Image: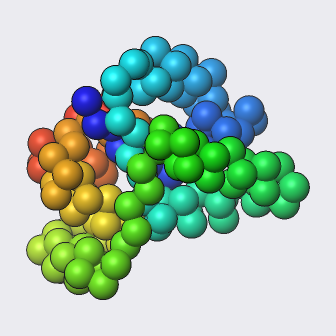
Amino acid sequence: MKIFVDTWGWIAISDDKDAYHKKAIHLYKNSVLVRGNKIVTSDFVLMETITALRLSLGHNRTLQWIRKVNEKSERGLLHIVSAERTLYQKAVQLLMRYSDKPDISLTDFTSFVIMQEQEINNVFTGDTHFEQVNLGFRLIK
């Protein structure tokens, strides 16, 4: 099974001061890291995460986190999708379609497109935007 990890998920498992840290660690170990699951994220999500982690954890701990993510990617444990021009364009089109939801970020719309294209239904996040768009995404709870 493929599971998309959103910014919320990365922050919650990485920042021990995060309000959802304990719950997120439990979910990550027991639902996401299950043998056979393929973990997917995007460079947009990682950029958002790194920005947030630098504010909460500081520069050096964030660099350690980046190294761990890169190692996971190099070992094939994490697939990072790059938001190329066509993906960006599809995300903007989706954003325009959801004009009634101005609080959903372009990063989230990019994630929605990736999930649709890769047929990923499960997402590790606490962000309810993934449910609000009614595209069949299921939050891991």
Residue beneath the point at 46% across and 24% down: 33
Q: Is residue 46 left or right of residue 108?
A: right
Say which of 138 and 47 sits in front. Answer: 47
Within the image, what quadrant is residue 86 found in?
bottom left
Vertical order, 65 against 63 (above or below)? above
Within the image, what quadrant is residue 18 found in?
top right
Can see residue 64? yes
Residue beneath the point at 78% across and 56% down: 63
Q: Return the x and y of residue 102 as percentages of the image width and height.
A: 30, 71
Q: Is residue 46 left or right of residue 36?
A: right
Residue beneath the point at 28% across and 37% down: 2
Q: How is the image coloured?
A: rainbow
Residue most toward the front? 75
Q: Quadrant of the C terminus?
A: top left
Q: Is residue 61 left or right of residue 79?
A: right
Can see residue 133? no
Vertical order, 133 against 37 (above or below)? below
Q: Quadrant of the N terminus?
A: top left
Residue beneath the point at 48% across and 60% down: 45
Q: Is residue 59 left or right of residue 70?
A: right
Q: Return the x and y of residue 29 as percentages of the image width and height.
A: 52, 19
Q: Say how many tags the image has.
A: 0
Say which of 140 and 30 sits in front. Answer: 30
Say which of 95 and 2 sits in front. Answer: 2
